[in-house]
Image (cartoon, grey):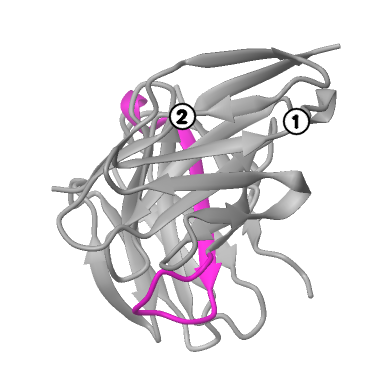
Amino acid sequence: AQSVAQPEDQVNVAEGNPLTVKCTYSVSGNPYLFWYVQYPNRGLQFLLKYITGDNLVKGSYGFEAEFNKSQTSFHLKKPSALVSDSALYFCALYYGNNRLAFGKGNQVVVIP
Amino acid sequence: KAGVTQTPRYLIKTRGQQVTLSCSPISGHRSVSWYQQTPGQGLQFLFEYFSETQRNKGNFPGRFSGRQFSNSRSEMNVSTLELGDSALYLCASSFLAGGPYEQYFGPGTRLTVT
C-alpha cells in the first residue's frame, strides 16, 4: 500500500534561515509526489511535483524539493524563509485516478 | 479563470440530519475529487468523478455519496450525520485524468455536527 510520512509535527525557523520540511514515502512502482500548502481557512495550494527526471524540482514562491529514490524521500526546501511562509505543508503521493494520499502535515512557523 | 468554488462555506447540522455540499470546478476541468480533513485523521480521499462517473471511492461508509453533473459541477451528500462527520470537506478539480496532474483545491466547506 502507498503511504506518506511527515515525521515532524512542527518546524520552527527564523526568518531568513533555510527551511526544510521532511517527507518520506512508500509505494510499489514509480512515485509521483506533490507538495501543497494550506493557509488558515483556505484550501490547499499546489507548490510543486515530481514525476520523473531531475531530482531537484523547482516550484512556486521560491520553494524547491529534492527527490531521493534511495532514501525514499522528497524534502521541501526554501533557501530563505519568510514570515509569510508560516502555514501547514502537506506532502502527497499520487496513486491513480486523481487520488492523492497525504501526509499528516507539518506546521511551519517562521519567527521574525 | 475563477478558481474552484464550494458552497456553503460553513454549515452547522444536527446529528441524524443529512447535508449536501456543492463544488464548482475550474471551467474546463472534468475531474472532481473530494477529501475530508480532520485533525485526527488528516486528509482522506472520499471519491473522484470524471465525466459524471464515479471512478473511485475511499474507505468511507455508504452514508457518504456524491454525483457529478454534465457541467462537471459536483455534489456530495452525507446522510444520517454523526458527530465524527464534523470536518473540512475539500473539493479539487483537474483538467485531465488518469495521470499525476495538479489538482486545484477549493476553500472547503466547514461542517459542524452537533
* Residue B69 relative to residue A29: left or right: right
Pointer 1 indicates a residue of which chain?
Answer: A
Q: Camera-side residue: A13 or B84?
A: A13
Q: Which residue is drawn at 40% across and 79% down?
A: B97
Q: Residue at x 23, y 53 (%)?
A: B58
Q: Which residue is drawn at 41% across and 34% down?
A: A23
* Residue B48 relative to residue A19: left or right: left
Q: Position of residue A86 (x, y in %)?
A: 72, 25
Q: Which amino acid does label 1 sit on?
A: Asp
Comes first in the chain, label 1 or label 2: 2
Q: Quadrant of the C terminus of chain B?
A: top left
Q: Position of residue A35 (x, y in %)?
A: 53, 47
Q: Position of residue A99 (x, y in %)?
A: 34, 60
Pointer 2 indicates a residue of which chain?
Answer: A
* Residue A33 relative to residue B3: left or right: left
Residue at mark 1: A85
Q: Camera-side residue: B17 or A13?
A: A13
Q: Residue at x 54, y 53 (%)?
A: A56
Point out the frontmost of discs 1 and 2: 2
Residue A102 vertical position relative to residue B7 in the rendered view, above or below? above
Q: Position of residue B54 (x, y in %)?
A: 28, 74
Residue B35 vertical position relative to residue B33 in the rendered view, above or below? above
Q: SS at mark 2?
A: loop
Q: Camera-side residue: B92 or B66?
A: B92
How crowded is the residue under tag 1: few (<14 C-alpha within 10 Å), some, or many (20+)?
some
Q: Is the residue under label 2 in contact with that under label 1 (CB below 8 Å)?
A: no
Q: Camera-side residue: A106 or B92?
A: A106
Residue at mark 2: A22
Residues beneath discs 1 and 2 located on the same chain:
yes
Residue A43 vertical position relative to residue B100 in the rendered view, above or below? above
Q: Find residue B84 and report its image quarter.
A: top left
